[in-house]
Amino acid sequence: MQILSFKESDIKEIVSLFYETVHSVNLKDYSQNELDAWAPREDKESKINSWSVSLSKNLSFIAKVEGKVVGFCDLTYDGHLDRLYVHKDYQGQGIASALVDKLESEAKKLNLFEIDTDASITAKPFFEHKGYFTVCSQTVERKGVKLTNYKMVKKIICSSPYTLL
């Protein structure tokens, strides 16, 4: 597996991975109606355009196995882990951990003190295992459908030789 910086040429593969993953992996925790609101197939083209812009602005990485995108993630410069998805056929192989480790390493270089994320019901145990704690449960609305997720935070220990007083 390789962890690489996001390239715009990978955007279609990334968006396809997102739709396939949400509609299969998250099916155990969300209804079909909720999944259709979260990842509506009719929005795929607009998501290609909007995500290309936002992934280019953020610290964004992809995981590739034999040239195939099998995961992706991004972090805003103020410490919000926006997206983390691993291909449905590559779950449980350490790809999400490798991607999050890369983001946390980058966060330390930026001297960020914490990373926050909005984790799905499905992703919550993964983030807990990685040292994130739940701040609160949240209800978000997508296309008129209410979805539950969790605001989670992890404190980052900076590698700076200076101590704040």
Image (cartoon, rainbow, N blue to C red):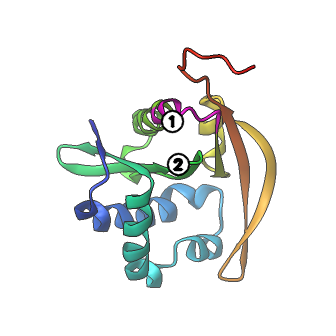
Q: Which sits earlier in the primary sequence, circle 1 or circle 2?
A: 2
**Disc 1 residue type (three-letter):** Leu
Find the magenta span and give its range: 106-114
Above-or-below relation of 81 to 18 = above
The spot of residue 32 in percent (x, y) is 60, 72
Dot 1, how many residues are within 10 Å of its Cα: few (below 14), some (14-19), or many (20+)? some
**Disc 2 residue type (three-letter):** Tyr
The spot of residue 142 in percent (x, y) is 66, 76
Local secondary structure at mark 2: loop
Local secondary structure at mark 1: loop
Is mark 1 in CB contact (under 8 Å) with mark 2?
yes
Quarter of the image containing the N terminus? Answer: top left
Quarter of the image containing the C terminus? Answer: top right
- From the viewer's side, name the closer residue of 77 and 16: 77
Q: What residue is disc 2 on? A: 77
Q: What residue is disc 1 on? A: 110
- From the viewer's side, name the closer residue of 62 and 162: 162
Above-or-below relation of 25 to 116 = below
